[in-house]
C-alpha cells in the first residue's frame, strides 16, 4: 500500500525541522539511537526471519548470516569507534599560514533518503541507516514493495523504535519513489539496478544532492587451469545458489580455460548436490525467484545457450534449478543483462587465456565484483589490469563480509562506498576549519605585499 504523498511531505518537513534543532548532533544521542536500533532488531528478529521465508523462501540460517548478522556487526563497529570517527582532527599547517592551526570537522549532511531493493531487504535498508544515525542525520526509509511481508515488519520495527520526525519508513511502488525523488534531500543512498540508479542521479542533480549508488552489473568469474577445481566448484556453487543468485555481487558469468571446462562442470554438479542434496527443489536452503515476473525473465535465459547442467523449472513455485549454460554468441540477452538468478553462462576462451580474459572483461562495463580462481600471483595481475568495485581471489562474495573494509561500485556498478567508517563518512561532510591566533598578525599577506621576494621563496 502506497504511503500518501501528502503524508510523505509532512514527514519530510518534520524531519527538516527536527534536524535544525540540533538534537542529532550529540554523540551520546547517536550512540543511544544505535543501541535502540540494535534492540529493535533483536525484538523483531524472529519476525524478520519469518518474513524473509514468506517472501523469498530464505531459511533462518541464510537470513541470519546474510542479513541480520551483518547489521549487528555494523552496529557494533559504530558503537566501538564513533567517538573517534567524529572527533575533531588536527591537520598539518604550512609555515606560510603561521600562526594558524588546521582542523577537519565531521558534520552530518542532514536529511537523508535511503531506498533499498528486495534481494537483501533487511541488510540493504538497515546497514545504510546505521551510517545515517552514526553521522547524525535524519532518515526517510523506503523498502521494496516486492517483499511486502518483510517491508511490513520493517515498518513495525522503525515505528516502535524511533519517532517519525527522526527516522520514518514509507511504503509504495515506483510512484512513491518518484514522489520521494522530486523532493529535496541532503543525501540520497540508493541500492538497485544501474538503470534506476541513473534516474536517481538525474533527480538528485536538480538539487545538487550528493548520492551513494550501490548498483550491480555482470560480475565475471575467471577460472584458470591452475585453479583447484574441486574447491573452486564448491565456492562458486555456494556463491551462485546463495539467495538463488539474486545477489548484486553474485558471479554472473564464467570465463574458463577450455582444458578444464568438462572437469569443472562435473565438479559443479557434485557440489550442488553436496550443498543442497540430490533434489535441490526440496531443500529448505534454496531460495525462490522473488516474483512471477522475475521467474519469467530468468527462465528465458535458458534459450540463449546449451544446457550443461541443471535446467529444471517450476513456475508454480518460481523455482529455477542452478544451471550451467554454454554460450557462444555474445549478443544474446543472457550476456548483455544482469542475470540476478541461478543461470550461469560458461564461456571457454581459446588462445592466451589471461590476455583473452582481461580483454573480455575490459570490453564491458565495470562490474561490481570480480572473481579469479587460479594461482594467486596471476589473480593479482588480472586485478591490476581490470577494474571493479571489489572482488576475491579464489573465493566469491566474501569481500562484503568484512565490515572493516569499504564496499562500493565503480562506473556503471555504482559510486560511493560504505561499511564501517565509510558508512559514517558517506553521510558526513568533512569540513575544514582554520583557527588563527590573534597574538600576532604578520603583514606579508596584506597589500602592498611587502617582502614579496622572501614570501615567494616560502611558497
Image (cartoon, rainbow, N blue to C red):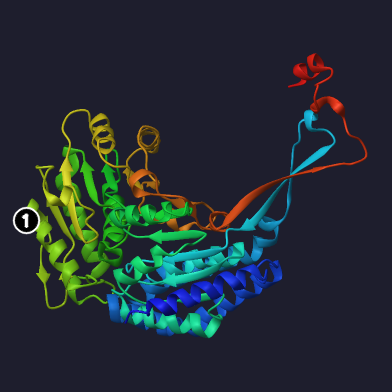
Residue 129 visible, this orientation: yes
Q: How many marks?
A: 1
Quarter of the image with the N terminus is: bottom left
In which quadrant of the rendered view does residue 420 lie? bottom right
Residue 313, percent from left and from top: 11, 69
Check the image and name the residue furthest to the top.
453
Residue 280 vs residue 87: left or right? left
Is 217 rendered above or below residue 18? above
Is 142 rendered above or below residue 255? below
Residue at 24%, 59% (x, y): give it. 340
At mark 1, the secondary structure is helix
Residue indicated by mark 1: 303
In which quadrant of the rendered view does residue 9 lie? bottom left
Is 185 rendered above or below residue 409? below
Residue at 79%, 14% (x, y): give it. 453
Residue 249 visible, this orientation: no
User: Looking at this view, is 378 or 37 the one in front?
Assistant: 37
Residue at 45%, 65% (x, y): give it. 114
User: Looking at this view, is 145 or 16 the one in front?
Assistant: 16
Residue 450, percent from left and from top: 84, 19
Quarter of the image with the C terminus is: top right
Residue 341, percent from left and from top: 22, 61
Is 203 rendered above or below residue 276? above
Check the image and name the residue furthest to the front.
448
Residue 28, percent from left and from top: 70, 70
Residue 349 vs residue 138: left or right? left
Dot 1 surroundings within 10 Å: few (below 14), some, or many (20 or more)? few
Residue at 66%, 49% (x, y): give it. 431
Residue 142 vs residue 56: left or right? right
Amino acid at each position: 500500500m502506497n504511503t500518501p504523498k501528502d503524508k510523505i511531505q509532512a514527514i519530510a518537513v518534520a524531519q527538516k525541522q527536527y534536524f535544525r534543532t540540533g538534537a542529532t548532533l550529540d554523540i551520546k544521542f547517536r550512540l543511544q539511537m544505535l543501541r535502540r536500533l540494535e534492540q529493535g532488531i533483536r525484538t523483531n528478529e524472529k519476525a524478520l526471519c519469518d518474513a524473509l521465508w514468506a517472501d523469498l523462501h530464505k531459511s533462518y540460517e541464510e537470513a541470519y548470516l546474510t542479513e541480520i548478522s551483518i547489521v549487528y556487526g555494523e552496529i557494533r563497529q559504530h558503537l566501538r569507534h564513533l567517538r573517534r570517527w567524529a572527533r575533531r582532527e588536527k591537520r598539518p599547517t604550512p609555515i606560510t599560514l603561521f600562526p594558524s592551526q588546521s582542523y577537519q570537522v565531521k558534520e552530518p549532511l542532514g536529511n537523508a533518503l535511503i531506498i533499498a531493493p528486495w534481494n537483501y531487504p533487511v541488510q540493504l535498508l538497515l546497514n545504510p541507516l546505521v551510517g545515517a544515525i552514526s553521522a547524525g542525520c535524519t532518515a526517510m526509509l523506503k523498502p521494496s514493495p516486492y517483499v511486502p511481508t518483510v517491508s511490513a515488519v520493517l515498518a513495525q520495527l522503525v515505528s516502535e523504535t524511533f519517532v517519525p520526525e527522526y527516522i520514518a519508513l514509507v511504503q509504495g511502488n515506483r510512484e512513491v519513489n518518484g514522489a520521494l525523488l522530486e523532493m529535496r534531500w541532503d543525501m540520497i543512498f540508493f541500492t538497485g539496478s544501474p538503470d534506476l540508479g541513473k534516474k536517481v542521479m538525474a533527480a538528485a542533480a536538480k538539487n545538487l544532492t550528493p548520492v551513494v549508488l550501490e548498483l550491480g552489473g555482470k560480475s565475471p568469474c575467471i577460472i584458470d587451469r591452475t585453479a583447484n577445481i574441486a574447491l573452486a566448484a564448491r565456492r562458486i556453487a555456494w556463491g551462485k545458489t546463495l539467495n538463488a543468485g539474486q545477489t548484486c555481487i553474485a558471479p554472473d558469468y564464467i570465463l574458463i580455460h577450455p582444458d578444464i571446462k568438462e572437469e569443472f562442470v562435473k565438479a559443479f554438479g557434485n557440489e550442488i548436490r553436496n550443498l543442497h542434496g540430490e533434489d535441490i527443489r526440496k531443500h529448505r536452503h534454496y531460495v525462490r525467484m522473488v516474483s512471477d515476473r522475475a521467474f519469467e525473465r530468468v527462465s528465458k535465459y535458458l534459450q540463449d545457450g546449451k544446457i550443461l547442467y541443471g535446467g529444471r523449472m517450476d513456475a508454480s513455485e518460481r523455482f529455477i534449478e542452478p544451471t550451467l549454460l554454454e554460450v557462444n554468441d555474445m549478443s544474446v540477452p543472457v550476456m548483455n543483462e544482469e542475470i540476478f538468478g541461478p543461470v550461469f553462462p560458461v564461456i571457454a576462451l581459446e588462445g592466451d587465456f589471461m590476455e583473452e580474459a582481461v580483454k573480455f572483461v575490459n570490453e564491458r562495463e565495470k562490474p561490481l565484483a570480480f572473481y579469479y580462481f587460479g594461482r594467486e600471483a596471476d589473480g593479482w595481475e588480472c586485478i591490476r589490469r581490470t577494474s571493479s568495485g571489489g572482488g576475491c581471489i579464489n573465493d566469491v562474495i566474501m569481500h562484503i563480509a568484512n565490515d572493516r573494509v569499504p564496499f562500493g561500485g565503480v562506473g556503471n556498478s555504482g559510486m560511493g562506498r560504505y561499511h564501517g567508517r565509510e558508512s559514517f563518512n558517506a553521510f558526513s561532510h568533512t569540513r575544514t576549519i582554520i583557527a588563527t591566533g590573534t597574538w600576532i598578525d604578520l603583514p606579508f599577506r596584506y597589500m602592498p605585499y611587502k617582502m614579496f621576494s622572501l614570501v615567494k621563496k616560502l611558497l
